[in-house]
Image (tube, rainbow, N blue to C red):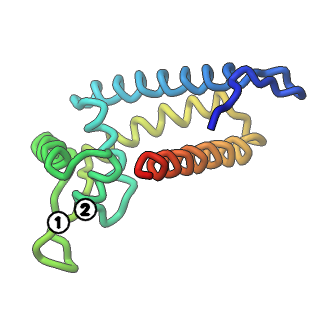
Amino acid sequence: MSHDLADVDKSTGIELTEVLAAFTRLRRENDLLVAAIARDHGLHAPDFRAVAFVRTTPDLTPRGLAEYLALSLSATTAVIDRLVASGYVLRTPNPEDGRSVRLEVTQEGADAVEDALEIYTAAFNISVPADRREDVAATFIDIADALAEVAVARTASARA
């Protein structure tokens, strides 16, 4: 499947390459911000992302975190060990089966995520007027869904 990146939207005059460049810039600025927030809290960016996911995902298991981080279970265990040692995450017994554990964020971890949320809230308040937020959220969801769809199709065609 080939796409013409120079395809111009006739209604706006914007080429797809401009949209992709804007998306790339957004990703880069986000990566830099996450790294800075993580550093402020004595963490590396991947560890901070893990803390944020633990904070927003009830009943999370190490396997669930591994899937989110796209890491092996052993690599994720190393991340969890660091986060537990640094006081950002707790391992708690799974009440449904006494052998496994669930992950919970500590108050320190919650505070770090709250710090990030304040920064993102400020940025979105500056850049997205209230009357456009629903459209922007829908666009983000559409892009995420399309990326997931393309990734699944790519994986399927690679296996064929």
Graded by Cα atoms within 10 Å as few (under 14), some (14 to 19) or many (20 or more), the crowding at tag 2 reads some
User: Hey, which quadrant is residue 16 in on the image?
Assistant: top right
The amino acid type found where label 1 is placed reads: Val
Q: Position of residue 39 (x, y in %)?
A: 27, 25
Give me the residue at 77% from left, 25% from top.
Answer: 7
**Disc ID at residue 101:** 1
Q: Are marks 1 and 2 in contact (CB under 8 Å)?
A: yes
Give me the residue at 17% from left, 78% from top.
Answer: 97
Q: Nearer the viewer, residue 114 or 153?
A: 153
Give me the residue at 58% from left, 50% from top.
Answer: 145
The answer to which of marks 1 and 2 sits earlier in the sequence is 2
Check disc 1 and report its element: helix, strand or loop.
Answer: strand
Q: Position of residue 35 (x, y in %)?
A: 34, 25
User: Marks 1/2: CA distance?
Assistant: 6 Å
Give me the residue at 35% from left, 63% from top.
Answer: 58
The amino acid type found where label 2 is placed reads: Thr
Q: Nearer the viewer, residue 131 or 17?
A: 17
Q: Position of residue 157 (x, y in %)?
A: 48, 48
Graded by Cα atoms within 10 Å as few (under 14), some (14 to 19) or many (20 or more), the crowding at tag 1 reads some
Label total for image: 2
User: Hey, which quadrant is residue 40 in on the image?
Assistant: top left
Residue furthest out toward the right: 11
Q: Is residue 16 left or right of residue 37?
A: right
Q: Position of residue 29 (x, y in %)?
A: 49, 22
**Disc ID at residue 61:** 2
